[in-house]
Image (cartoon, rainbow, N blue to C red):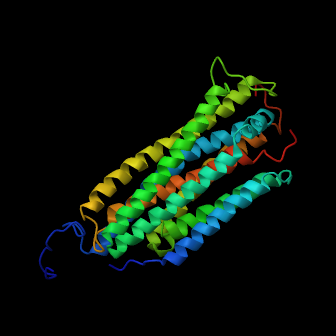
Amino acid sequence: MSEHIDSIRTYTLVLLALLVLTAVTTLVAFVDLGEFSVVVALAIAVCKMLLVALFFMHVRHSTKLTKLVVLGGLLWLAILLMLTLSDFTTRGWIGVPGR
Amino acid sequence: MASEAQAHAETAALRVQFDTEAQQKDASTLGMWIFLITEVMFFGGMFTAYTVYRRAYSDAFAVASSSLNVTIGAINTAVLLFSSFTMVMAVRASQLGQRRMIVLFLVLTLIFGGMFLGVKAYEWNEKFEQHHVPGPSFHMEGVAQQGHAQLFFSLYFAMTGLHAAHMVIGVGLLSWLIWMANKGKFTAEYNTPVDIAGLYWHFVDVIWIFLFPLLYLIDRHLPK
C-alpha cells in the first residue's frame, strides 16, 4: 500500500494543540471583546476543524479528487449560510409591507 | 498475484471491479467523504437556523446560552478530542497491522465516546430538573419572552440530540470494528473499515467543535 503513516509524535502534538485551543476558546469567552467574541470563537473552531481534517482525517495525504470534494462541500455550506443571512440581515433596510 | 492479462483473484483488499488496491482504497475514501458532505449540509441547516434565530432573539438567546454549564461543556469537548486521538491511533495501528493495538485503541475510543454520552445525559437531565425543556412546564428566569428562550432550547436539544444520535451510531460501528479486529480481519493490506469509521468519528468530533462555542460560549462576555 502507498499509504502515508504519520508518527505518534505528530498525532500527540495535534491532540495537544486541540486541547490548548479548547482551553483558550473557553477562557477568552469570558473576556468582553464585544462583537468580536463570535469572530474569535469561530476562528478558533475553524483552526480546530482544520487540524482534525488535515491530520486526523488524513486530508493532507488524500487524492486531489478527495480534496476537491471536501472544498466543494464547504463551498455549498457557505452558499447555504450566505444566501440565507443576506436575506435575514437586509430585510430591515427597506420598508417591505407585511414583513 | 495474478498476471495483468487475467482477472485477478478476489480479496477483501482487491475486489474484482478494481484494478489495484490503491484504486479501491481511494474509491472508499471518496465515497465516505461524499457521505460526510451530505452530513455537513444536514447539520448546516440546523446551524443556519440557529444563526438566524440568535440574531432575531439575541437577548433571550444570551440568557439561555449562558445558563448552560460551561465547565462540563469544556471537559466533554476534551473527552471527545481524546477519543479522536485514540481513533486515529487505532487507524495507525491498522495501517501497521498491529491487531492487539487496533483492539486496544478502539476500546479506548469506545470508552471516551461512552463518557461523552454519559456526561451529555447528565446535562440533559439537569435541563429537565430546571424546567429548561421546551413545553408547558418551561420556565426561565430573567427572560421577558419565554417563547424565545424555548426556541433556544429547542435548537439546543435538536442539535445536541442529532449529534448524540451520531455518537450512538459511532459506538455501534466501534463495537463491530472491535469484534472484527479481534478476529484478525484487519491487516496492513486491508484496513479500510477502520479508516472509514475513523473519518466518521472525526466528523462527529468536528460538529461538536462548532456546537460547543456556538451553544455554550459566545454570549458569556455579556453583562449578566
How many numbered marks does the figure carry? Answer: 0
* Residue B30 seen in the current view: no
Q: In this picture, is A51 found above or below B117?
A: below
Quarter of the rendering occupied by the N terminus of chain B: bottom left
Task: Measuring from the top left, give residue B37's x and y in whole percent.
Answer: 49, 54
Residue found at the far left of this picture: B6
Residue at the spot 33% in from the left edge and 61% down from the top edge: B193
* Residue B84 seen in the current view: yes
Question: For this rendering, which residue is in front, A53 or B109?
Answer: B109
Task: Measuring from the top left, give residue B92's x and y in whole percent.
Answer: 41, 71
Q: In this picture, is B128 found above or below A18?
A: above
For residue B187, side relative to residue B88 (left or right): left
For residue B121, side relative to residue B179 (left or right): right
Residue at the spot 64% in from the left edge and 68% down from the top edge: A17
For residue A37, side relative to residue B199 (left or right): right
Quarter of the rendering occupied by the C terminus of chain B: top right
Task: Measuring from the top left, give residue B97's x and y in whole percent.
Answer: 31, 73
Task: Measuring from the top left, give residue B85's x and y in whole percent.
Answer: 51, 64
Residue at the spot 64% in from the left edge and 26% down from the top edge: B129
In which quarter of the view is residue B65 placed? top right
Question: For this rendering, which residue is in front, B212 or B27?
Answer: B212
In which quarter of the view is residue A62 placed? bottom left
In which quarter of the view is residue B146 placed? top right
Q: In this picture, is B99 found above or below A43?
A: below
Residue at the spot 32% in from the left edge and 74% down from the top edge: B22
